[in-house]
Structure formats: structure tokens, C-alpha cells
Image: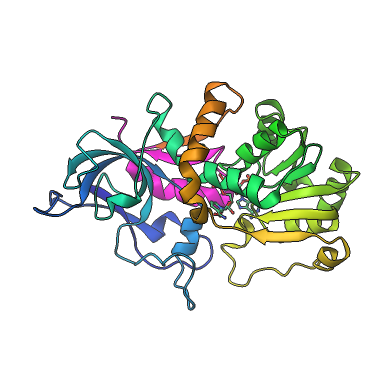
Amino acid sequence: NRSVILKRHVTGFPTEDDMELVTATVRLAVPPGSAAVMVKNMYLSCDPYMRSRMTNHKEPSYVPDYVPGEIIPTFGVSKVVESGHPDYKAGDLVWGMTACEEYTLITTPESLFKINHPELPLSYYLGVLGMPGLTAYAGFFDVAKPKKGDYVFISAASGAIGQLVGQLAKMTGCYVVGSAGSDEKVNLLKTKFGFDDAFNYKKEQDLNAALKRCFPEGIDIYFDNVGGAILDAALLNMRLHGRVAMCGLISQYNLELHEGVCNLACVVTKRVRIEGFIVTEYFGTYRKFEEEMVGHLKEENITYVEDVAEGIENMPAALVGLFYGRNIGKQLVAVARD
Ligand code: NDP
């Protein structure tokens, strides 16, 4: 059983060397009498929040820190190979919290979701039909509360979540602009995901000017995936009663001291609502979301781009790549295709 362990807690940007591929010869099995299940991991997810779990936090975070020397937990799409649980049998396909290894013994199978639509690409359950999909859906509809005609801005717009928020916003009748870190990604936003406009934030001298150019009448909804300078510029461009859905701040995750936001006064003068959210609070709504999103995929209202690294040995590089914008679309790792 090959697995990826965290070697040490991380400060600054994570490196591949913070992780290690190890091989164990012990054969995993469900202990007699236990209600655990053993799964074969087919696809494993690389997500930005994993960087936070690599930190040795002084104050408890919203998720526990990873433990050096232990296998890194992550979301996966897996096949049950042995079950001690009455609700699962060998061959069942599931998604949920597993670990960066080929086989995992899952002691809390109640936390897994059975895969109801194996006719769609199974890897979608790590993206559009999994945690990022639910994040996009809940963050946009429940937190940002869009209306037809709203002006919507999305950062990290070509990523796992951003590409979906953009498409959901277009389906709602909004005007949608995204920012991304390369011309290739900007092109994808405009040609594949149907954004009305997009810009490469790395090429803009003045982010405020870029947003003024794209939104002469201002922004109603900013779906924030990055925080930092882009959030600051977006605040300057919010309209009265605008909403900022704070999904994540990837530009800050590797900094010891987070950058200050200078334009908070705009929140008062423009009566902006800034609201953070965590997707796990919406897991209870997953089945409703899944059916709706499956419908959109089958009707081709929604398209989804993935970036698939091959082999568990490439997990560390794929995870580190998120913080350099190397991924185009949802980053995942294919471990076993059947
Ligand atoms: P992505 O697929 O968007 O991958 C991360 C992307 O972030 C990179 O490709 C890169 O794109 C961009 N990025 C990296 N560093 C920077 C930087 N310094 N400044 C600006 N952009 C940067 O990731 P996800 O869609 O999975 O996640 C997006 C955000 O949502 C993250 O902040 C994540 O933590 C958050 N999140 C929040 C959840 C919640 O419950 N609130 C749940 C899941 C995720 P580019 O090339 O465009 O710079």
C-alpha cells in the first residue's frame, strides 16, 4: 500500500519535500466484528484548504492540523473492497474523506456518500459533483443571493470552484467577469465557460483600473477565492448593497502574516455585506444539489474542466502546484481507474 505522508509542518509555500511517498507491506483488512469498510482509492483530491492543515496552528483551526509522520487525509472517489458495515458491500462506489494512499480503512463509513450516477465520469465526484461543486452552488445561491442582471466578479475563476460559479451566474442571467493567472486560463473563461469578460490579474498594473474597465457600473457580487489585493480592489468597485461571498483567500495561505485590507470603509459607505461560509455546513443538502447538477451536466448546461495527475507518486507535486496556479481546472490525482 503506497501512501503520502506529511514529513513536517509547513511554514511559507509548501514544497514536494514536505511530503513523502512511503510503501507499507502490511495488508489492510477490516477487523472482525468492526463496522469499518476498506476502500480502494481511485481518484484523490488536491484542495487549497490542505495547506492550512499542514500548519502547526497555535489556536485550533476549523479543521484539525495534519500530523507529521501520518498519511495525509483527503477527499477521494473510492471502491469498497471489503465491508463490515451493513449499508456497504464490495463493489460499491463512494466519495468522501479518505487518505492519500492506495487502500484505506475507513472507520466512519457513515461519512461517505454513495455514488448515484456512475454513468458520469467518477472523478466528477471530486469536483463538479463533490465538495467544490457544492461550495460553488451554496456560496453563490445561498450566500451571494444573486438576481438576474447582477454584475458578478469571480477570482481564481478557472479553478475547481470558480468555473462553476461563473456558469451558474450566467444561467441566472448575470453579467460575469473572472480573473485568472494566465492568458490560457483567461481564454478558457471566455470561450469554454461563457464568461462575458475576463482578465489576467498578473498582467494588470492596477487592479482597481482593471475592475473599473470591466465593471463601469460596479460589482453586485464578488465571489472571492483569493483575498488580498484583488479583494481590496473589488471593495472599491462594489455597488450599493453589494455582496461579497468569502469562499477562500488562497493568496494569503502561505504568508505568516496576512496582508491587511485597506478599503474596508467601502463596506460601510456602500452597505456591502461580506459573508464567509464553509461548505461542510451544506453537506446535509448534498443530494438535492447532486440531482440538480447531474441534470445540468446531462443537459450540457454546465461543462467541467479537470487537471488530472497520473499516479499517487505525483500527489505532492499536484498539491504544491495549486499555489503556483499550475492547475487548469480541478486538480486531482488518478490512482486506479477501476
Ligand atoms: P483552484 O482550482 O482555483 O486552484 C487554486 C488556484 O488559485 C490556482 O490555480 C491559482 O489560479 C489561484 N491562486 C494561487 N495562488 C494565488 C495568489 N497568490 N493570488 C491569486 N490567485 C492565486 O482551487 P479551488 O477552486 O479548489 O478553491 C478556490 C478557493 O476556494 C480557495 O481559496 C479555497 O481555499 C476555497 N475553498 C473554500 C471552501 C469553503 O467551504 N469556503 C471549500 C473549498 C475551497 P490562477 O492561475 O488564476 O492564479
- Residue 99 in sight from this viewpoint: no
Q: In this view, does 7 lie to the left or right of 10?
A: left
Q: Does the magenta stretch include residue 126?
A: no
Residue drawn at point x = 15 percent, y = 54 percent: 34
In the image, 311 versus 231, the foreground residue is: 231
Residue 87 placement (x, y as % from top left): 24, 43
Residue 311 placement (x, y as % from top left): 34, 38
Q: Is residue 77 above or below residue 302?
A: below
Q: In this view, does 311 lie above or below 49?
A: above
Query: Extreme right residue here?
Result: 216
Residue drawn at point x = 81 percent, y = 64 percent: 267
In the image, 141 versus 163, the foreground residue is: 141
Q: Which colour scheme is used?
A: rainbow
Residue 156 placement (x, y as % from top left): 65, 46
Query: Extreme bottom residue here?
Result: 58
Q: Is residue 3 left or right of residue 232?
A: left
In the image, 322 versus 196, the foreground residue is: 196
Q: In this view, does 62 lie above or below 32?
A: below
Q: Does the magenta stretch include residue 331?
A: yes
Give the extent of the magenta segment: 310-338
Q: How many labels does the image show?
A: 0
Q: Is residue 165 left or right of residue 309?
A: right
Q: In this view, does 236 lie to the left or right of 261?
A: right
Residue 165 placement (x, y as % from top left): 64, 40
